[in-house]
């Protein structure tokens, strides 16, 4: 469904979703991370199927969840694979590193 989100991670500590779930290129995309006692979230996206540089992600906190809005450029691959790398800092001093992959689509 074009309007739905894609769950990239859902475990006992962190929920991570991408909206819209079909991740159309050259369209605003939103990552939402929900977890308790998070101090900060940072990360970047890199192309796996093709080098597209690094896309830095700037997270801000909104109503108990962390969000980053970003755009991904179009390339010659209509089913481009991207890798997301996040670092989540918790209030208790713990750091969790996440690596997830997803595909973009042409609108």
Image (tube, grey):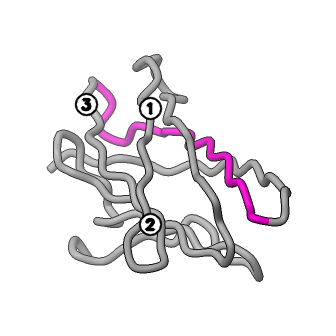
Q: Nearer the viewer, residue 105 or 30?
A: 30
What distance separates the C-alpha of mark 2 from that of mark 3? Answer: 20 Å
Q: Nearer the viewer, residue 8 or 13?
A: 13
State whether the magenta stretch is mostly helix, strand or loop: strand
Question: Which residue corresponds to mark 1?
Answer: 56
User: Which segment did they paint magenta?
Assistant: 76-91
What distance separates the C-alpha of mark 1 from that of mark 2? Answer: 15 Å
**Residue 81 among magenta residues:** yes
Question: Which residue corresponds to mark 3?
Answer: 73
Question: Which residue corresponds to mark 2?
Answer: 32
Q: Position of residue 3 (x, y in %)?
A: 22, 75
Q: Nearer the viewer, residue 29 or 38?
A: 38
Q: How many marks?
A: 3
Query: Which quadrant of the view contains residue 60?
Result: bottom left
Q: Earlier in the sequence, mark 1 or mark 3?
A: 1
**Residue 29 among magenta residues:** no
Q: Say left or right for 69 vs 48.
A: left
In terms of secondary structure, where does tag 2 sit? strand
Query: Which quadrant of the view contains residue 12?
Result: bottom right
Quarter of the image with the N terminus is: bottom left
Q: Residues within 10 Å of mark 1 (few under 14, many from 20)?
A: some
Q: Position of residue 94 (x, y in %)?
A: 85, 57
Closer to us: mark 2 or mark 3? Answer: 2
Q: Position of residue 53 (x, y in %)?
A: 44, 17
Closer to us: mark 1 or mark 3? Answer: 1
């Amino acid at each position: 469904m074009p309007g739905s989100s894609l769950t990239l991670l859902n475990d006992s500590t962190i929920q991570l979703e991408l909206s819209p779930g079909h991740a159309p290129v050259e369209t605003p995309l939103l990552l939402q991370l929900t977890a308790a006692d998070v101090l900060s979230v940072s990360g970047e996206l890199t192309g796996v199927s093709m080098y597209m540089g690094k896309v830095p992600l700037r997270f801000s906190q909104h109503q108990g969840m962390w969000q980053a809005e970003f755009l991904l450029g179009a390339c010659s691959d209509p089913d481009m694979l991207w890798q997301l790398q996040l670092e989540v800092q918790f209030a208790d001093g713990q750091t969790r590193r996440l690596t997830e992959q997803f595909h973009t689509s042409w609108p």
